[in-house]
Amino acid sequence: MKKYVPSTGETTVFVYDASGKLVAEYSTSVVPVQDAKVNYLTSDHLGSPRINTDATGGVIARHDYHPFGEEIFTAQRTAQLDYSADSVRKQFTGYERDTETDLDFAQARYYNKNHGRFTGSDPYLIVQQKARGKSVDEQKKILNNYILNAQAWNRYVFVLNSPLTIIDKSGKCSVPAGLKPGQTGICVEAYIRAPVVKGVGLGDNRGSSGVDGTLTSRVRTDLIISKNGNGTAHIHWETTTAQSMVINPLPAVNPISPPTPPVFSAQGVSTTSVTNAVTESDSTTRFTLGVTATNGFRANYGVGPEGDIDYKINFQVTADNKVGIDTGSDSKTYPTLDIYAYSMDDKGNVTVTSRLQQNEKDISDLTKPKEPLPVVIPQ
């Protein structure tokens, strides 16, 4: 990703790996252009750069953070140990620091590390999310999940007040139900970031999140991998497919009796395949998930967008429950595809790791062939 500031002439290039993690930042204005240097960032499990090194491996700066992002300064953290200021803007959880306001840019809004809160409210509306439930029971479940999660009521809260294990990359997939210590959870979901598609279709109007089960998606698969003592593994999975919705072209207030609904809906359909888990001699487990989903109006009435959501993911799960994506995985480039991995310790604390975030391109890509997905190293 390249950023150019006309007022200063500075060009900054941010380099990300296949899982979306920032690994390097190049700038032309840190020093004179002819002497511009490289900063390599070594991040912790939250994506916060902790050690910055140059091209030779020499340490340029170190950073430690309090749980909600304030940098730690103590008498023991001295310049001799390389705890010093630097010009890298990527800070807490990988947010870009705005030096003028001292706020962190979280895509949808800004984050104030001193308060541990976002400066703007989350655009999420429970009423709209509840309406997307495909049945009365599902609508009740969406509402009940929201009511029971009191941390979600505060629309300025940061990662449900669990900053040691959860990150919020977008500023707005959840833990698979039934996950237990020692098991590995995976959530794969395809959703439409835009609120409206082609002026009539309703999208999911959301960003990436691995912790908010009330967010909707077009299709989602939750998997739990349990490794048995005899060297085999068992996979439990469940796929949920959402209703497709279009805006009623008639005005909200009209003489028709009975009144027409604000949206029309049709249940989407999907097929899921999960291959048998193969556990290798090093206790690495491999399996393949394949999902195809069709728009509800296309499936039921023969109208609506042509083409299907379609992806195949070759997973690997290591002996210590790290999740990676093997070569040979592919997907359509619409809609957005996110993959998260989950692990739980003996105290019930859940660690969430983003494994893939592929942003959607154009809805016409549903009719095009699938494209290869990047290989993701287990972590």
Image: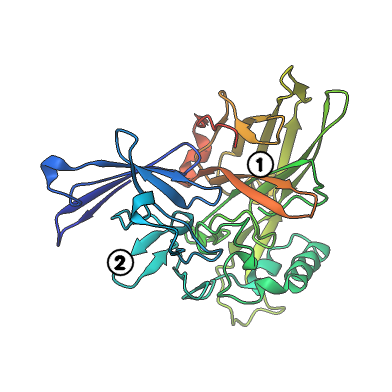
Question: SS class of the residue under badge 2?
Answer: loop
Label 2 vs label 1, nearer the camera: 2
Name the one closer to the observer, 295 or 325. 325
Question: SS class of the residue under badge 1?
Answer: strand
Mark positioned earlier in the residue sequence (2 or 1):
2
Image coords of residue 49 (percent x, y): 44, 50
Mark 1 nearby-residue class (10 Å; few <14, some 14–19, many ≥20): many
Name the one closer to the observer, 304 or 273. 273
In this picture, is 110 found above or below 227? below
Query: Cβ–Cβ below 8 Å for labels 2 and 1?
Result: no
316 to the left or right of 223? left
In this picture, is 378 found above or below 7? above
Give the label on residue 93, or none. none
**Quarter assignment of residue 226:** top right
User: Which residue is depicted at the point 72% across and 78% down?
Assistant: 258
User: Which residue is depicted at the point 66% across and 71% down?
Assistant: 152
User: Which residue is depicted at the point 47% across and 67% down?
Assistant: 70
Q: Is residue 303 visible?
A: no
Q: Quadrant of the C terminus?
A: top right
The amino acid on which the numbered mark 1 sits, given as a three-letter code, is Ala
Mark count? 2
**Which residue in the protein does label 1 denote?**
293
Q: CA distance from mark 2 to mark 1?
A: 44 Å
294 to the left or right of 192? right
Image coords of residue 354 (percent x, y): 58, 46
The amino acid on which the numbered mark 2 sits, given as a three-letter code, is Thr
Q: Is residue 209 visible?
A: yes
Mark 2 nearby-residue class (10 Å; few <14, some 14–19, many ≥20): few
**Which residue in the protein does label 2 denote?**
99
Image coords of residue 104 (percent x, y): 41, 65
Name the one closer to the observer, 254 or 280. 280
